[in-house]
Image (cartoon, helix red, strand yellow):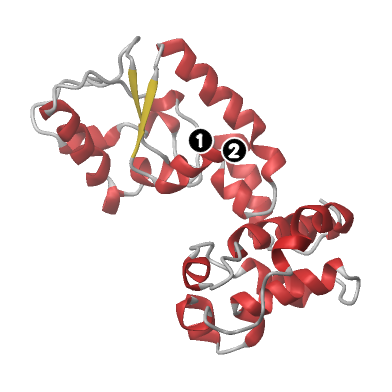
Amino acid sequence: MNIVQLKKLSYDEVAKCNKCGFCLPSCPTYLVKKSEAYSPRGRNAITRFAIENSLDLNADTEKAIFTCLGCGACAAACLSSVQTKDLIFQNRECQVDRGFYPKVAKRLVKTLEESRNISDDDQDDRAEWQELIKDLPEDAFEKERSDILFFVGCVASFFPMVQKIPANMAKILQMAEVDFTILGGDEWCCGFPLVGAGMPEKLEELKKHNLQKVAEVGAKKIVFTCPSCLHTWKHL
């Protein structure tokens, strides 16, 4: 995305910021940094100045724009309902276009291209969280056809500290007598990390693959426990 495109998408929204500061107590990065550049209104100012050509995006603006957590707490506190998170994600696309973005983003792209998950783990281990459920037959939830698909997500699949989340969701679905399936190793990252990295165009391959797999199992509804996965499927 270039500045002209950013202006078309963002200027009316960023102009709504009246610099009141009600967002400051809600921003995790501002509370730590105590710097205007790391606050919602500071980041909005960067976006507006870039659009108005009074500021060039550079290494300093990269730090301010890419340290936003994207939590949306600022929007909840904003009297003008400025959607700062969305503005920042759009700004990041411009930063990437200018070559000013964290180098970890390059590693992220490579990892997703090679491993199809954010942790560079073996895809065959995606369903190992099922081991937390006692007396469960191997691959019990991986069915060829089902009306309901449980999309687990990368973090819950590979990070032991949160694998209890999909295990408990599966138990809930079982207790409710809901017939469902999971994709296991055929599930790829939803692509949200690429959106956060300012590279949404690179998630197309991931999206097409997951949509194809959903169609193959005949799922009519998808269940999520990961908010990032839900956001990606719902809005992107």
Under mark 1, the amino acid is Trp
For the residue carrying disc 1, how many other residues have a C-alpha within 10 Å: few (<14), some (14-19), or many (20+)?
some
In the image, is residue 57 above or below residue 175?
below
Quarter where residue 81 is shown: bottom right
Residue 125 at x, y percent in the picture: 36, 33
The residue indicated by pointer 1 is 233
Residue that protrudes farthest toward the bottom in the picture:
34
Residue 171 at x, y percent in the picture: 15, 33
| Residue at 64% across, 37% down | 203
In the image, is residue 4 above or below residue 152?
below
Disc 2 versus disc 1: distance between alpha carbons? 6 Å
The answer to whether 175 appears left or right of 199 in the picture is left
Q: Please report contact status of discs 2 and 1: CB closer than 8 Å, yes or no.
A: yes
| Residue at 69% across, 60% down | 103
The residue indicated by pointer 2 is 236
Who is closer to the viewer here, 14 or 88?
14
Under mark 2, the amino acid is Leu
Who is closer to the viewer here, 16 or 27?
16
Q: Quadrant of the C terminus?
A: top right
In the image, is residue 61 above or below residue 196?
below
Q: Indicate the secondary structure of the residue bearing disc 2.
A: loop
Who is closer to the viewer here, 157 or 145?
145
